[in-house]
Amino acid sequence: MRHRSLLILTSVLTTGALTLTACGSRDDKGGSDNNADGGGITVVIGVDAPLTGSLSALGQGIKNSVDLAAKTANKNKEVPGVTFKVEALDDQAVPASGQANATKLVGNKDVLGVVGPLNSGVSQQMQGVFAAAKLAQVSPANTNPALSQGDNWGKGEFKRPFPTYFRTAATDVVQGKFAAQYLFKDAGKKKVFVVDDKQTYGAGLAAIFSDEFKRLGGQVVDTDHVTVKETDFSSTADKVKASGADSVYFGGQYPEGGLLSDQIKKTGAKIPVMGGDGIYDPAFISASAEANDGDLATSIGYPVEKLDTAKKFIADYNAGGYKDPYAAYGGYSYDAGWAVIQAVKAVVQGNGGKLPADARAKVTEALGKVSFDGVTGKVSFDEFGDTTNKQLTVYKVEGGKWIDVKSDTFNQ
């Protein structure tokens, strides 16, 4: 995509995609070609997220948070001799676009790590591309267990498909069970109607929730499916009303989840809708014309605003002039970007201040050993590339806002 050595700094902002490239690159022996204008080593951190479309509120927060991590590293000279830049690409939450973006990022030899994507279904199409190029990716939001533990994880057969895949988000195994336990034990609901959007994330999360809810003694009275980007869910809402369910669990994202909650309540079924981190967004609340106080969502980690470790991140983000909020995954995105930065630091320090010829492979190897106190708590990865941080929070809609009602560390 680009020549290995670039001498011009360009900043292009088009259709929501931020592309940043700069001078300096590896030579054939792994060093940098320090040129007359200061030179040094340039390392690009790729970002893939939905920067436009219905999920752009989350994608922009991911992009901006990684940008802040790169700027912080440069300001503090975190890796002497290295300048970090960001290349952010828009996947619009479409798997084919994510795969094309992965190919583009692989083609830029200065990219040594990628943060993203948001969606598990998109990641399924990107993983193989990155693995073939030995390029590490760290998702701040993917929760499908198969991405790191293989397709047979549900049978107790765990096999990591790609050594280049990492994530700072807890998996749906954790989130789905946590949600079921809260709804059954804390909220006292015994009869749930389960709906999903037929996507990798939503269907997987709904299945894990259902298994745990039934194991606890609850009843799944019926199930149904909705289609992404459709807006009329009245038939599902009528089924919910007729079922006698005391609650609904929705596996999917906030655009459909908010409308589903609205249409269920319009039938007269005044029961809570619960979902995962995909619905934990103000847009879920605003999508419903009916008051949806009492609706519930789980999200990874503890509320960032209440973490002492996140105070500096929040202050720096607010001072950074970003027009979009860091949203649900900002802290995890910053930590994902910082994990790449720390891996690059370890590789450079271990190679006499230069990048080795096999820098991508070395960065991937170093990521597996990364451990630091991040915005969201302790950041490190297990043998599958999964986060060791299993903290989660339940949120409830009260007065038109999401309010945290329970935070805990989940132990399976």
Image (cartoon, rainbow, N blue to C red):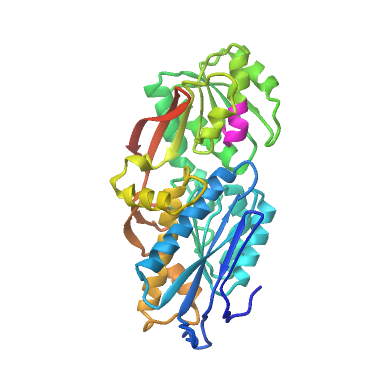
Q: Is residue 405 above or below residue 314?
A: above
Tell me which residue sits at (37%, 39%) in the image.
Answer: 303
Q: Magenta residues, as a range?
A: 251-259
Q: Position of residue 110 (x, y in %)?
A: 54, 74
**Front residue (pair 255, 364):** 255
Q: Position of residue 244 (x, y in %)?
A: 56, 12
Q: Position of residue 153 (x, y in %)?
A: 50, 47
Quarter location, residue 258: top right
* Number of marks in the rendered image: 0
Q: Is residue 164 magenta?
A: no
Q: Is residue 85 above or below residue 97?
A: below
Q: Is residue 351 above or below residue 324?
A: below
Tell me which residue sits at (50%, 54%) in the image.
Answer: 64
Is residue 288 shown left or right of residue 186?
right
Q: Is residue 299 visible?
A: yes
Quarter location, residue 256: top right
User: In which quadrant will I find the C terminus?
Assistant: top left
**Front residue (pair 9, 151):** 9
Q: Is residue 342 visible?
A: no
Tell me which residue sits at (57%, 47%) in the image.
Answer: 119
